[in-house]
């Protein structure tokens, strides 16, 4: 009987020990989430405090189901005047808003788009169209032609020559298109550059906003699904916006440069700290249980 009682006592202690470990882990997890939230808030406030007026209002709003004006006029890579509607009617369209002389994220975003589309089994020009529009009204069809030669060549599928369009235009038409899809940018005279966020937009064959992808890397599987949905005139759901901005002001140098993800750095450091704290608490609980 004493052996049985001793065995039951050890089982109870073991159960209590495990319960204590679970409770400690839960407390640590809650504290971790709290610290993470505080860090993100502090970092965002710190980042906002040094943001100059030129970058305020820059971003991408999700205007799902909004109709883009198909009567807007642009010039294609050959210099021919075209209406935006000439690329719509039968196929979904992927829209990217960049500028061809951008020294920063625009090229990275277009490269990311290219890499994703090369992994999509659908072919540009057959199942869907791609329209790349410069937000810089001073850029020329020759610049558009140069970009088209590079990306269509790297894409390597014959139909893309007729299906991937690089356009330039006048400021009113560029602004009207940008506003319709929620793409907000600012021109910075000091550097002759544009401050803008990066992303692509999937439109239905009738020209309605169906889906947004942010950043400079786009999952091919998600793009394929978005094209399938858009081809049926379906409108996707809002997505979490993790935006990268092409330009950021550095108060220490007085210059604009590529954004170093300040908030992400702080958040990452806090996350590692929280994980370490949790593992430490669990290991201590394990040692106590063993003793």
Image: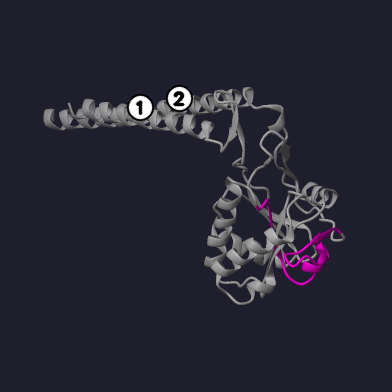
What residue is drawn where x is 49% and y is 28%? 36
Q: CA distance from mark 1 to mark 2?
A: 10 Å
Where disc 2 sits, the SS reads helix
Q: Residue 153's image quarter?
A: bottom right
What residue is drawn where x is 80% and y is 67%? 80
The residue lying toward the viewer, choosing from 249 and 125, is 249
Q: Residue 196's image quarter?
A: top right
Is residue 286 rendered to the left or right of residue 232?
A: left
What residue is drawn where x is 55% and y is 56%? 112
Q: x and y percent of residue 66 in the render?
A: 80, 52
Q: According to the image, label 2 marks what residue?
A: 31
Earlier-in-chain disc, 1 versus 2: 2
Q: Are marks 1 and 2 in contact (CB under 8 Å)?
A: yes
What residue is drawn where x is 81% and y is 47%? 175
Q: x and y percent of residue 222 in the render?
A: 58, 59
Q: Is residue 259 magenta?
A: no
Q: Is residue 136 above or below residue 1?
A: below
Q: x and y percent of residue 239 in the render?
A: 64, 47
Does any portion of residue 16 appear in the rendered image? Answer: no
The residue lying toward the viewer, choosing from 224 and 100, is 100
Q: According to the image, label 1 marks what residue?
A: 277
Residue interval drawn in magenta: 72-100
Q: Is residue 93 magenta?
A: yes
Residue lying furthest right: 71
Q: Is residue 270 above or below residue 182?
A: above
Task: Specify few, some or many for label 2: CA neighbours under 10 Å numbering under 14, 14-19, or 20 or more.
Answer: some
State the scheme by which the image is colored.
Answer: one colour
Does any portion of residue 182 appear in the rendered image? Answer: yes
Name the quadrant of the N terminus: top left
């Amino acid at each position: 009987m004493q052996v049985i009682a001793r065995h039951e006592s050890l089982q109870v202690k073991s159960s209590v020990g495990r319960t204590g470990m679970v409770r400690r882990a839960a407390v640590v997890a809650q504290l971790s989430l709290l610290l993470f939230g505080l860090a993100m808030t502090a970092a965002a406030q710190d980042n906002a405090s040094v943001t100059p007026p030129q970058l305020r209002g820059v971003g991408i709003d999700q205007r799902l189901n909004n109709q883009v004006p198909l009567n807007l006029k642009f010039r294609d890579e050959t210099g021919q005047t075209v209406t935006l509607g000439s690329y719509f009617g039968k196929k979904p369209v992927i829209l990217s808003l960049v500028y061809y002389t951008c020294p920063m994220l625009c090229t990275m975003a277009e490269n990311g788009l290219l890499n994703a589309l090369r992994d999509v089994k659908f072919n540009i020009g057959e199942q869907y169209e791609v329209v790349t529009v410069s937000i810089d009204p001073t850029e020329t069809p020759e610049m558009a032609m140069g970009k088209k030669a590079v990306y269509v060549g790297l894409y390597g599928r014959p139909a893309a020559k007729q299906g991937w369009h690089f356009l330039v235009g006048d400021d009113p038409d560029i602004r009207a298109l940008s506003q319709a899809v929620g793409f907000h940018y600012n021109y910075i005279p000091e550097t002759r550059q544009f401050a803008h966020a990066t992303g692509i937009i999937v439109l239905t064959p009738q020209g309605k906003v169906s889906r947004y992808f942010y950043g400079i890397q786009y999952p091919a599987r998600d793009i394929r699904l978005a094209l399938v949905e858009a081809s049926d005139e379906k409108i996707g759901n809002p997505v979490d916006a993790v935006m990268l901005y092409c330009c950021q002001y550095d108060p220490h140098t007085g210059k604009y440069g590529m954004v170093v993800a300040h908030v992400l750095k702080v958040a990452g450091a806090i996350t590692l700290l929280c994980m370490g704290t949790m593992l430490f608490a669990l290991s201590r609980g394990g040692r106590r249980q063993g003793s």
